[in-house]
């Protein structure tokens, strides 16, 4: 009996010694990911806020407290950029999502042939590089030699100043954004449509509901969580909009397509005023957070 106890004792001691190592091992595995997140996410966020408290004078940086934020409130160019971004958010985003919903409903129709090929065709613009498709639209919409004006000329329509007129430049920017992102949102809506129970449509049809009423009372409520998702993502993307106005119009003409993201870039990397650019970034983050909360309050599920 004593011999058996003596042989069992080392095994028990070994288990006791290994127990702390087993608890620490999972944290060691996630440590590289946490370290990378801290270095490339947390540190830049904290440093950007610290940088927003400094004024840049050439190569000299002096502590200015909230001066950059006070300058932001009184900066008319910032408010112009915010207004331009708001116009895109209010006009282009709802139009794009409405077209995406209609496209998803059409792509979900059992009468459509070659559905896989057609879905791929609508999604392909999303995988096109931002700069590449911006250059593509710049060539197509060139007022002098663009393909679009050439086609309009064949129909007897005079050339349209797509990129040189304030109104048409905004329309051109909206067309480019709609072309690029509509198919992506349509695929998201389509995945939700395919998950909706067919029994709901059958019950609505038995009750005498027509196509429009089935869409209004079955499809739209079923798409509500995905509408919220795409709306929030589109809002964030629009408020951070940079590539398209930079490539298409560079913010012109007359700052009509200047967005907050482009204005931030100009201050940070063209004028090297990193303190003011950081203040713009934090103001933009606050605006995105407020709009996100409002959207979740209005469209979120209520229990």
Image (tube, rainbow, N blue to C red):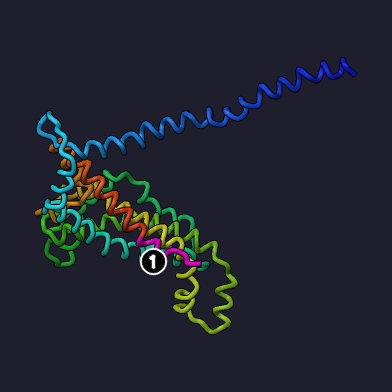
Q: Is residue 140 left or right of residue 3?
A: left
Q: Nearer the viewer, residue 124 or 286?
A: 286
Dot 1 falls on a residue whose secondary structure is helix
Q: Is residue 254 magenta?
A: no
Residue found at the very far front of the displayed protein:
2
Q: Residue at x 45, y 70 (%)?
A: 220
Q: Residue at x 69, y 24 (%)?
A: 16
Q: Residue at x 36, y 66 (%)?
A: 98
How many numbered badges does the structure rendering display? 1
- Residue 200 seen in the current view: yes
Picture coordinates of residue 300, whole percent (x, y): 43, 63
Q: Nearer the viewer, residue 81 or 292?
A: 292
| Disc 1 residue crowd, few under 14, some 14–19, many 20+, Cα 10 Å | few
Picture coordinates of residue 22, whole percent (x, y): 62, 28
Q: Nearer the viewer, residue 240 or 61?
A: 61
Q: Is residue 294 above or below residue 60?
A: below
Query: Which range of residues does the magenta coloring cover?
Result: 294-303
Q: Is residue 158 above or below residue 234?
A: below
Which quadrant is home to the N terminus?
top right
Residue found at the very far bottom of the displayed protein:
208
Q: Residue at x 21, y 40 (%)?
A: 52
Picture coordinates of residue 171, whole percent (x, y): 20, 60
The residue carrying mark 1 is 298
Q: Is residue 130 above or below residue 115?
A: above
Prevalent SS, magenta region: helix
Q: Is residue 246 left or right of residue 113?
A: left
Q: Nearer the viewer, residue 219 or 137?
A: 219
Picture coordinates of residue 293, whole percent (x, y): 36, 58
């Amino acid at each position: 009996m004593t011999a058996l106890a003596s042989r069992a004792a080392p095994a028990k001691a070994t288990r006791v010694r290994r127990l702390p190592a087993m608890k620490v091992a999972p944290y060691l595995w996630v440590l590289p990911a946490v370290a990378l997140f801290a270095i490339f996410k947390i540190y830049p966020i904290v440093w950007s806020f610290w940088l927003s408290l400094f004024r840049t004078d050439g190569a000299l940086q002096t502590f200015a407290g909230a001066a950059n934020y006070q300058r932001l409130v009184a900066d008319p160019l910032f408010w112009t950029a915010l207004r331009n971004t708001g116009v895109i958010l209010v006009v282009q985003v709802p139009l794009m999502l409405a077209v995406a919903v209609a496209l998803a409903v059409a792509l979900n129709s059992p009468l459509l042939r070659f559905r896989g090929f057609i879905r791929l065709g609508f999604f392909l613009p999303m995988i096109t590089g931002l700069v590449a498709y911006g250059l593509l639209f710049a060539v197509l919409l060139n007022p002098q030699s663009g393909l679009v004006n050439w086609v309009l000329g064949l129909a007897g329509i005079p050339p349209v100043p797509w990129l040189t007129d304030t109104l048409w430049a905004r329309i051109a920017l909206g067309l480019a954004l709609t072309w690029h992102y509509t198919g992506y949102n349509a695929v998201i809506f389509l995945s939700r449509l395919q998950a909706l129970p067919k029994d709901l449509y059958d019950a609505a049809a038995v009750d005498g509901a027509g196509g429009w009423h089935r869409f209004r009372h079955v499809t739209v409520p079923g798409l509500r969580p995905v509408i919220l998702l795409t709306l929030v993502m589109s809002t964030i993307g629009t408020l951070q909009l940079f590539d398209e106005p930079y490539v298409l119009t560079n913010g012109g003409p007359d700052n009509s397509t200047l967005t907050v993201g482009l204005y931030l870039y100009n201050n940070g990397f063209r004028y090297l005023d990193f303190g003011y650019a950081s203040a713009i970034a934090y103001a933009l983050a606050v605006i995105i957070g407020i709009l996100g909360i409002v959207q979740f309050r209005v469209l979120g599920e209520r229990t």
